[in-house]
Amino acid sequence: MEVTEAFTKVESDTSTNSRNEFRWLKEHAIAATKQTASPARQGWRQRLRALCVVRGRGRPLQYLLGTEYFGNLEIVCKPGVLIPRQETAASVTYLVNRLVQRRSQLPSRLRVLDLCTGTGCIPLLFHDELYSAIAKHPRLELLGIDLSKDAVRLARLNWQEQLKDQTNVRGEKSPRVQSLERTNFMRANVLARVASDENPTTPSVEGLLSDASASGEVRSEWDILTCNPPYISPRAFNHTTARSVRNFEPKLALVPAERPGLSDDEAGDMFYPRLLEIADFVRAKIVLFEVADLEQAQRVAEMVVSRNAFERVEIWRDDPSQVNDHHDHTGDLKCVRLRGEGNGRTVVAWRAEGLDWLGE
Ligand SMILES: C[S@@+](CC[C@H](N)C(=O)[O-])C[C@H]1O[C@@H](n2cnc3c(N)ncnc32)[C@H](O)[C@@H]1O
C-alpha cells in the first residue's frame, strides 16, 4: 500500500488533520532514522510507510509519536496507558488559576494526591503551573497512585523527564526542582477497601498510605485529592466510544471492572463513592473528579452533596475558564454551580477549610 493511500484510511479525520498528522509522522520517521546507528537501518520512507499503515488501522497518533502535550508539558505516551486529554488539562489549569488568585491565603505547604494517575500528567501539570504562576509558592508534595504497573512505570518516567528538563546544565537544583523531587508514584487499588478485596498483592489506598506514612515515606493526609477515574459505562463503551479508543487504549483506564447486579449508570459511577471515602480518610480539603458528561456530573454532585461534608460543590464544563453569566445551577441541585462552556467535565468540591483557598 502506498504511504498516502494508507494514510487516507485514518478514521474520521478531516483532510487538514490528515495533512498535519502526515507531516508529524514524517518528521518523526526522519528523526528516528537519524538516531539509529545500525548500518542495516531502515530508510525514513520505509519507516514512514510502516507508521502510516498502523495509523490507518486506527492506532492513536500519540502512541506512534510517543508524546502528547498536556498544558505546556510534553508527556511520554505508551500503549497500555491512557493518552492524556486536553479537557483534563483545562480543569487542572483552572484549579491552579483559582488557587493562584488567592495565593496570599495558601498554606506554606500543599499536598496533592492524584488517584488513577496514568501517565502522571495531572500532578506534573499541577506542579508546573503552580510554580510558573507564583514566585513565593507553597512547598508542594505530590503523590500519584495507579493500579496498573505500566502506568506507575510510565508516570515515574514522565517525572524523571520533567526533572531532567528543569535541572540546569550545571546540575544545579532550583527550588522548583527540589519541590518536584518531593513526588512519588505508587501502586494501589482505589476500589479495594482492604488488600484482600480483589487483588491480594495490591494494597488499598488506605492500606498503602497507612504503611507508607508509618515508615515516613509519604503522609496520610492530603490537602487536594484529584482523580480522573475509569468512568465509562459498559453500554457507552460498546456503543459510543470511538473505535481507536476502544481498540487501542486500555479498557482498565476507561471502564470500571464489571460487577454483577449494577445498572449501567451505577457501573460507570463505581469509583466515585470510593473516592469520597478516600477523601475523608486523607482529610482532603478540595476534591476534583473528572466525569463523562453533565448527567454523570449531576449524579456525582448529588453524591457529594448528600455527604454533607463540603461547603461548596461546582460542576466545571470542558472549558471552565469561559465566563458564563447565567450563574447556572443544575437540576434540583440548587446549591451546585455550573461553570464554563461545553459538556460537564469535572465535579469540584471544597470543605470549610478550603474556603480561603478557593473562595465562596
Ligand atoms: C481515565 S485513566 C486516567 C489517567 C490519567 N489520570 C489521565 O488523566 O490521563 C484511569 C486510570 O485509572 C487506573 N485504574 C483503573 N482501575 C483502578 C483501580 N481500581 N485503582 C487504581 N487505579 C485504577 C487505570 O490504570 C488508568 O491509568
Image (cartoon, rainbow, N blue to C red):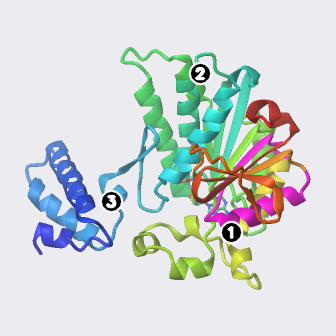
Earlier-in-chain disc, 3 versus 2: 3
What span is in magenta?
Answer: 281-308
Q: Residue 61, labelled with which disc?
A: 3
Q: Is residue 71 left or right of residue 113?
A: left
**Residue 174 located within the stretch drawn in magenta:** no
Instruction: Provide the residue designation for mark 1.
Output: 295
Residue type, label 3: Leu
Question: Circles 2 and 1: CB distance less than 8 Å?
Answer: no
**Horizontal and vertical percent for residue 58?**
33, 71
Residue found 24% across the figure and 59% down from its top: 16
Residue found 54% across the figure and 46% down from its top: 90
Question: Circles 3 and 2: CB distance less than 8 Å?
Answer: no
> CA separation, marks 2 and 1?
36 Å
Q: How many marks?
A: 3
Label 2 crowd bin: few (<14), some (14–19), many (20+), radius 10 Å: few
Q: Is residue 161 left or right of residue 140?
A: left
